[in-house]
Image: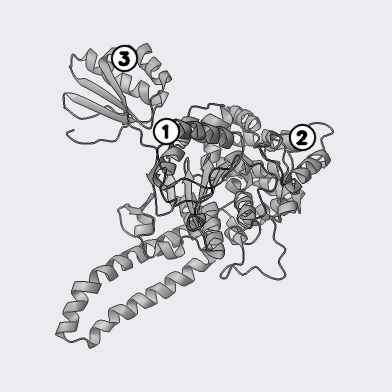
Amino acid sequence: MGRAQGASHSPPSLCDGRFCFLVRPRIKTMRYIADIVNADKMSGRSRKYKIIFSPQKFYACEMVLEEEGVFGDVTCDEWSFYLLPLDEDIISMELPEFFRDYFLEGDHRWINSVARALQLLNSLYGPFGKAYGIGRCAKMSYELWRDLEEESEADGQGRKPEIGNVFLMDRDTDYVTALCSQVVYEGLVDDTFRIKCGSVDFGPDVTSSDKSIKVLLNAQDKVFSQIRNEHFSSVFGFLSQKSRNLQAQYDRRRGMDIKQMKNFVSQELKGLKQEHRLLSLHIGACESIMKKKTKQDFQEMIKAEHSLLEGFDIRESTSFIEEHIDRQVSPIESLRLMCLLSITENGLIPKDYRSLKTQYLQSYGPEHLLTFHNLKRIGLLTEQSAGETLTAVESKVSKLVTDRAAGKITDAFNSLARKSNFRAISKKLGLIPRVDGEYDLKMPRDMAYVFSGAYVPLSCKIIEQVTLGRGWVGLGLVGPTDNPAWDSQRVILAVFLGGCTFSEIAALRFLGKERGCKFIFLTTAITNSARMMEAMIEAKA
């Protein structure tokens, strides 16, 4: 290969006689490649083309190439690259399309990739202990994974297990957490600047220069690793203290003799300069976040979200959402707030649904009609049917939460979104903490700190129930496997199908510290509320 070049909508500038495309199996990408091949044919160029699909090849892609008349001109291959380590404890499959493909379109093609990723981890670090799962996707992934394990029984036999229990969670079992505004530092950086594949582009407003800088955000960044899981209100204080400590280390030079100075320059100075550079970037990022959030009335938005979660002042929160739409603050944010209202209230009453929908279409354009259709279909933004009450749902959930003998996925409780049991579940599991006085965000006592003490992420709370030995609280046990050694029980694999937020990661890291265990995260992609809403939007405004 001569050199690698990122694909874009403009034709590639390479003059080589060979093209190698390393791509995801997407229809849009196939049309792009077909355009390049056909353009070369038209201009009389003769080249060899190879397409490498990762993680697997789909028949639909070959059909598109055939329709475009280029299938005979290209050779196709597969690269089974399922897992991308983003950090010491985060592994991503980098499949952002998984959420829309499976939960909206009902497309099961990525289930095989998930099962093979689990098989790969099991062969390297297994055999795993018990596997717990909630949701249809979790069930299918588990069953296919077990089938693959049976076919390759020899792999991993006799090895000392390094991972204990495995939790598989469908994203649609907990939409609420993904829809809430993130307030831990890493989550805010993702919401504001978009973290992609573990790195972020900080623009001139952060770097205080005319250049943008790409920064890798992981445990190797000494500054970031200490603030990533902190509530944003604690971050400035830490950075200020860190700045003073660095200055004190620099000031030590003044009393040094030549030998000490030589050692300082050769051993410490480079590390101090690197730390100083990172500190400046994170201070700049904090200032930029503060400016943007102040413009967006962030505190008022958080207050409205907390009211929705707690079930208080719903009328007032609805008025806030209407004002947000009328002021045309952001189409994505308006949609997010409407979805949060819908899920926490078991759907909108018909009058409110029609009113909010009309106002939204008038503010942001009628092309969003299809977006409302998608949101309704996936269960994010629904309308209450006549005579629907929560009583039947509450009794059903009550049974589920107390029935510990459940041995299979309960399809009736497949999705919190489709028949919102949020109030009942919230009450049963204590998702809204009862706090006397003000919640201490600097010294948090539970996972609720990731949402300013107002809400414990449901997905994390369910995992906590099992780690406390209370079983899967009737929410559905996928199936047990062999019992591993006790040491491996301290390492838990949390698998999020449809995306995982940095708030959930921070909450489970906190739980791990409290319980003396470590969580490893496997997700189809890192997500947040904006990415979820964008996946539902048909018209790119």
Q: Nearer the viewer, residue 157 or 370?
A: 157
> Which image quadrant for residue 140?
top right
- How many C-alpha atoms fall within 10 Å of the one at disc 3: few (<14), some, or many (≥20)? some
Q: Which residue is mark 3?
A: 71
Residue 261, compared with residue 132, is above or below; it is below
* Callout 2: SS: loop
Name the amino acid type tagged 2. Gln
Residues under labels 1 and 3: Cα distance?
34 Å
In the picture, measured across the screen, residue 123 lies left or right of residue 341, that is left
Instruction: Please say if the residues under marks 1 and 3 sit with CB atoms less than 8 Å apart.
Output: no
**Residue 537 visible to an observer of this rendering:** no
At 67% across and 38% down in the image, what residue appears?
A: 417
Question: Percent x, y for residue 247?
Answer: 33, 77
Say which quadrant the N terminus sits in. top left
Question: Percent x, y for residue 337?
Answer: 64, 45
* Callout 1: SS: loop
Mark 1 or 2: in front is: 1
In the picture, measured across the screen, residue 349 lies left or right of residue 61, that is right
Q: Which residue is mark 2?
A: 384
In the picture, measured across the screen, residue 532 lies left or right of residue 24, that is right
Name the amino acid type tagged 1. Ser
Instruction: Please say if the residues under marks 3 and 2 sit with CB atoms less than 8 Å apart.
Output: no
Residue 530, compared with residue 456, is above or below; it is above
Q: Nearer the viewer, residue 155 or 41?
A: 155
Name the amino acid type tagged 3. Phe
Residue 181, compared with residue 534, is above or below; it is below
Q: Earlier in the sequence, mark 1 or mark 3?
A: 3
Mark 1 or 3: in front is: 1
Q: Which mark is residue 152?
A: 1
In the picture, measured across the screen, residue 541 lies left or right of residue 205, that is right
Mark 3 or 2: in front is: 3
